[in-house]
Amino acid sequence: MIHTMRWFGPNDPVSLMDIRQAGCSGIVSALHQIPVGAVWTIADIEERKQLIEEKNTLYSPLNWLVVESLPVHEDIKKGLSSRDLFIENYKTSLRNLSACGIKTVCYNFMPVLDWSRTELDYKMPEGSRTLRFVWVDFAIFDLFILNRPNAEADYEPETRIAAEMKYKSMSSHQLSVLTNTVLLGLPGSEEAFDLSIFQSLLDQYAAINDSQLRKNLYYFISQVAPLAQELGVKLCIHPDDPPRSLLGLPRVVSTASDFEQLMQACDVRANGITFCTGSLGVSEDNHLVEMIERFGDRIHFVHLRTTKREEGTRNFHEAPHLNGDVDMYEVVKALVKEEKRRKEAGYTDLELPMRPDHGFQMLDDLNKKTYPGYSAIGRLKALAELRGLEMGITRSL
């Protein structure tokens, strides 16, 4: 695989040199400064590309290999009449990325929230910190902070009771931290959105059920994937994180069946998958090796991470990359076999770009401000483990 890391741009506390020294040759980045739905111009793309790929004779080169993410406007997800304008903007951005030589584009179709966690600094037994999702805490946000209409129907009686008891014991500071943590999943910002606008965003999905959201996704992909195929651009959808309905919002990219329906909606290879083992691995019903074997030809980008489901609950936390619920040995073996299959079939894109996702905050990084899950040392450790695992598997085949 091609080893990469995500870089958030010039303001990222993790530098390009840090990523280079970690052993990466590829960069995953995006133009977060551009409003969602606006066109990514060639000038803006080239500015970032030149920053990443600055030519020098002293250091090993870095290449901007993957865009993560080119976000999909909410009007497209909601199927509004304005969606065609935003789809045309999306197509223009794809043309511009292709013209600049960037051929892999990750996106997601999660309504309102891109991801959901309730804790950003969960302490592990060895003292490192990581991300965690606690069902009761999410219920506290939904039921007693947001006060979402009819939210009670989404929680079991015991969860509602536990949430109310804990809510009454929490300080205003604790409630504020929980609120900001949940709202960090809103796309297009580095800071949490204001709670006052959040319910209005949810209200706009009141009439959009699972079936309608799927139709909106399939309409979008049928419009953009044929163009991507012509351009040689590979689109790769990121699965829902976590793979379950939250806040009454439908989730339509969580299972093998979801992938199958999406692939059939526009049967071109450019309509592909970001295979995130962490997001998919939260559900014990997802059999990751089988999914790789089934959809290998459509996997264009890989996120390797794992979570640990907390027994008897709906909670989970990010786990050490080789010691969670994901059988990382079997997953990496299946991916190496897919690359081997591509080589034998004469593919030009036989190597999969992979990034170690959601590294722990540890060592010196415990005292630094970093993006949650994206500290330097934790990802360095994860990449080192994954590179060793990959090498051992490759040499054994």
Image (spheres, grey):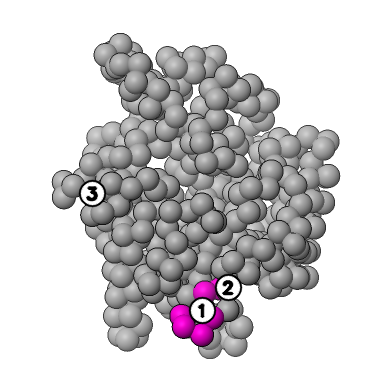
Q: Tag 1, which secondary structure?
A: loop
Q: What stretch is highlighted in magenta?
A: 56-63
Q: Does the magenta stretch include residue 61?
A: yes
Q: Tag 2, which secondary structure?
A: loop
Left or right: 190 in relation to 305: right
Earlier-in-chain disc, 3 versus 2:
2
Q: Do the residues labelled 1 and 2 touch (CB within 8 Å)?
A: yes
| Residue bearing mark 2 | 53
Earlier-in-chain disc, 3 versus 1:
1
Q: Which of 203 and 342 is in front in this view?
A: 203
Neighbours of disc 2 within 10 Å: few (<14), some (14-19), many (20+): some
Q: Which of 269 and 52 is in front in this view?
A: 52
Q: Residue at x 68, y 44 (%)?
A: 36
Q: Which mark is residue 61?
A: 1
Q: In which quarter of the image is the N terminus?
A: bottom left
Left or right: 163 in relation to 363: right
Q: Which mark is residue 128?
A: 3
Q: In which quarter of the image is the C terminus?
A: bottom left
